[in-house]
Image (cartoon, rainbow, N blue to C red):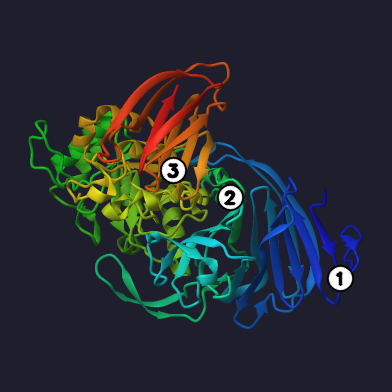
Amino acid sequence: MYLFTRIAACISISLCLFAPVYGKQETFELRSPGGKLKVSIVIEDKILFTISDQDEPILRNNHLSLSLKDEVLGNNPQLVSAKKTKGGDLIKPFVALKFSTVRNEYNGLILKFKHDFALEFRAFDEGVAYRFITSKKGEIEVAGEQVTVNFPSEYILHLQQNKGFKTAYEEPYQHVESTSWKSTDPMANLPVLIDTKKKHKILVSESDLSDYPALFFKGTGSNGMASAFPKVPLEFGPDGDRSQKITKSADYIAKTSGTRSFPWRYFVITSDDKQLLENTMTLKLAAKSEIADPTWVKPGQASWEWWNDATPYGPDVNFESGYNLETYKYYIDFASKFGIKYIVMDEGWAKSTTDPYTPNPKVDVKELIRYGKTKNVNIILWLTWLTVHNHMDLFKTFQEWGIKGVKIDFMDRSDQWMVNYYENVAREAAKYHIMVDFHGSFKPAGLEYKYPNVISYEGVRGMEQMGGCTPDNSIYLPFMRNAVGPMDFTPGAMLNMQPDVNRGVRPNATAIGTRAYQLALYVVFESGIQMLADNPTLYYRNQECTEFITNVPTTWDETKALAAVAGEVAVVAKRKGDKWFIGAITNGKEKERTIELDLSFLDKSKTYSMTSFEDGMNAGKQAMDYRRNVKQVKSADKIKIKMVRNGGWAAVLQ
């Protein structure tokens, strides 16, 4: 099968397969290795591409161009050459969120044009990607970049809509008919999930985002969506202790090197929702690691005090709990007992939010670092992004103290300046062997593979939203947000409520969904740093649940989706070594669901002991009701699991 065909006047005999169609129009067809997906590129007065599955167009006549200060690359393009490419390498990500080895197989096409630019397309069996490449001298100003995506019929768009470019990507998902999305409606950040209402889902996101703003989309009002980008900020004003106001912006979206490749934009195309749960496209398109030896990066779980307001209590708490030395030692003792690698010390560990060098005397960070080492527990410190920006030498200081990671918060922007800030932080932190967890952040877009010390991002409507975090919204996360990269959702609630009776606030924070649902999140959701958000007191009182949670790995050798309906059900099995975990979650749409799981993915020569946690008989009302079961299973078995509304099911097989 040809990697691509060209319908045009000949450039070379090897490419001339058909006679010209008409005038200056030239058409290329690029097929995926298996031949199922096809991208058709038409070059005339502008550049258009259509993506088809088995020759059925699913995104049609999408327009691409790149506007520079004095020219528009893509208007009246003049083709110089076409070159086919092919990929088939193996990628072994250091922080393996889904697979320890990923095969990167694609057919590619690079189209070079006059005026020193090119477009590169890649067709994978699971999707299509493109990027611009320029080879201009010196620096260029990018006034804008145009990608217009057109839908052949009315689709449903699952997206987070933003009032402006200042966003932490925490808005709840909206579900919009594509024909009704007007240009005056709120725009949306990536990722976007498109439902064709037939058999296809299309996940849209980007990778290798560097020295360039993040992509947003706005409706066109004509059954399509068009790109939008934040402008480059030029001047700033004060905005409290943790951010800055943009007081002046440029009329361009980026000032950057004239010779560079631009971010990849990709479309994961599936006819089975299970494929979304196994997606690795961000990894396949990311830049290679800049860290030669990342073995000092240690993914793991962390006990976190903010969600439960640092308030352990009970007969073993013979001190006033709070943000103080005794309380943090208690968290370290808890972490040590269950083999948890880290504790996170959130706001309050320092004397002020603007000075990262002077700890709160009530906390005594250096004593906690010393104490933690005796218990094999390390410390991650929270900081505002502005404080880090003002004190980029703090990573050297933190390494001297013995700090292993930082949690950086409140960026809430994704313009070129802020995208560069992320990379500057990752690079500087890596010099001193410091891991980074970005909060108040945009979605992952490949930096976590370029710098594996970036172990997670928030950029999600997670459990810190309290009653605003519902399974009806969170059920989309494995198909969208977590499908593009690590996600610091902060699970682990031991006070579980159904939505109609949820009343919790800190320090007695509650979460909507059943206990089994919370346990399953540790298997279904992926993060290089996975929080235990609740109070150690409650984990001690729920020992068998805590033992399950703390035995779930944060990195995996293999991921296999077992059942999936985007927005309703996600069931996934994950392997670490010879041990399998299964997690299942659902929303509140149905009172009860029964799903049959095929265990044929297990080793056929082995009998497994399966310890499972399922929704109890009364979990539909009393969400803390669960049952723990132990049974023997084999690969030939099929088992039925039941979940109540907002419920879950979790198991370990060993």
Question: Between marks 3 and 2, how big is the CA–CA gap?
Answer: 15 Å
Q: Earlier in the sequence, mark 3 or mark 2?
A: 2
The relative height of residue 469 versus residue 241 in the rendered view (above or below) is above
At a point 56% along the width and 62% down the height, the residue shown is 155
Where is residue 478 drawn, in percent x and y?
A: 46, 47
Instruction: Identify the residue position indicated by label 1 in the image.
Output: 21
Residue 94 shows in the view: no
Residue 389 left/right relative to 111: left
**Spot occupied by residue 497 in the image (x, y as percentages of width and height):** 26, 44
Residue 526: mark: 3
Circle 1 sits in a helix, a strand or a loop, which is it? Answer: loop
- Residue type at mark 1 is Val
Q: What is the C-alpha distance between the residues marked 3 and 1?
A: 49 Å
Q: Which mark is residue 281?
A: 2
Image: 38 above or below 151: above
* Left or right position of 414 against 269: left
Say if mark 2 contacts mark 1, CB within 8 Å.
no
Sequence order check, earlier mark of 2 and 1: 1
Q: Secondary structure at mark 3?
A: loop
Front residue (pair 136, 473): 473
Q: Nearer the viewer, residue 246 or 500?
A: 500
Q: Position of residue 576 (x, y in %)?
A: 48, 30
Looking at the image, is 24 positioned above or below residue 91?
below
| Category of crowding for the residue at label 1, using alpha-carbon neighbours closer than 10 angstroms: few (below 14), some (14–19), many (at least 20) | few
Give the Cα distance between marks 2 and 1.
34 Å
In this rendering, the label closer to the viewer, 2 or 1: 1
The dot on residue 322 is none
On the image, which quarter does residue 52 sit in?
A: bottom right
Q: Mark 3 or mark 1: which is in front?
A: 1
Label 2 sits on what residue type? Answer: Met
- View extreme (front): residue: 591
Q: Amino acid at mark 3?
A: Glu
